[in-house]
Amino acid sequence: MDDVTSEFDLVLQAFWLTIQLAALSGVVSLVLGTVLAAMRVGPVAPFRLAATTYVNVVRNTPLLIVFVFVFVAFPNLGLLVGTPFLLKGVVAVSLYTAPFVCEAIRAGINAVPLGQAEAARAIGLTFGQTMGNVVLPQAFRAAVPPLASVLIAMTKNTSIAAVFGLMEATARMRYFTNNSADDTVIFLVFALGYIIIVETLSAGAWGLERRWRVAR
């Protein structure tokens, strides 16, 4: 306990890094996942095949393997050389999470009545305009609960970054436990920190879903 209280600034820095990693990865995953979902339901067969292949392959690949590719294989191929560890972590988490976001959004798209897309095309809207103005806004409303679950899981998955030298909350907890392995307060402090982050995400998703329901 003394180690945590005397170096509490390190605890705050670790959780701040975790929040940055989760927030940046969440934004990138939402954008990439939305693009993948649009490709999967789009009319262009090669795009559908590419998106489907990516989603199926990555969803069945352990996150640790994705991190190995980003932190080890990519630099050997000349990619992400000299990139800060935080951004590499964002790339790894985003590449892994985007397929799950894609499937959540695709489920939301399937919940939108087909007649609305047909009506949009009937008045001359392109596929992109139909998706952006008619389908996706409704799909996101339907996809809020599964998206919240995906983003909560993503936040917990950021702990893998500790293996690759990113001093986020899990890595900092390991630093403290190496000095005081029998101090259970350390585990409680970091567990409480993760609970606060996850519950904040859950509350935000619940509030957004409730707001949209009232707006209907």
Image (tube, helix red, strand yellow):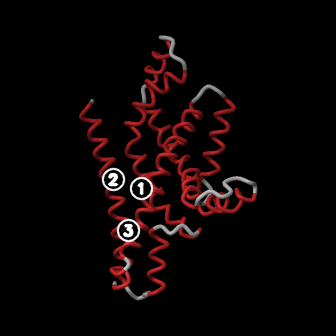
In this rendering, position of residue 211 left or right of residue 36: left
> Residue tagged by mark 2?
202
Q: Compare residues 65 and 117 and report the one nearer the observer.
A: 65
Which residue is drawn at the image coordinates 50% and 16% (left, top)?
Answer: 125
Residues packed near mark 2 inside 10 Å, few (<14), some (14 to 19) or many (20 plus): some
Q: Does the residue at mark 2 contact the one at mark 1 (Cβ under 8 Å)?
A: yes
Question: How far across and down, in percent of the image, does residue 180 sit?
Answer: 42, 87
Q: Which amino acid does label 1 sit on?
A: Ile
Q: Which amino acid does label 2 sit on?
A: Ser
Between the C-alphas of marks 1 and 3, the distance is 20 Å
Question: How far across and down, in percent of the image, does residue 177 sit?
Answer: 45, 82
> Residue tagged by mark 3?
12
> Residue tagged by mark 1?
152
> Relative to residue 50, is residue 72 depicted above or below?
below
Name, please, the residue furthest toward the right.
77
Mark 2 / mark 3, whichever is N-terminal:
3
Question: How far across and down, in percent of the image, does residue 55 sit?
Answer: 60, 45
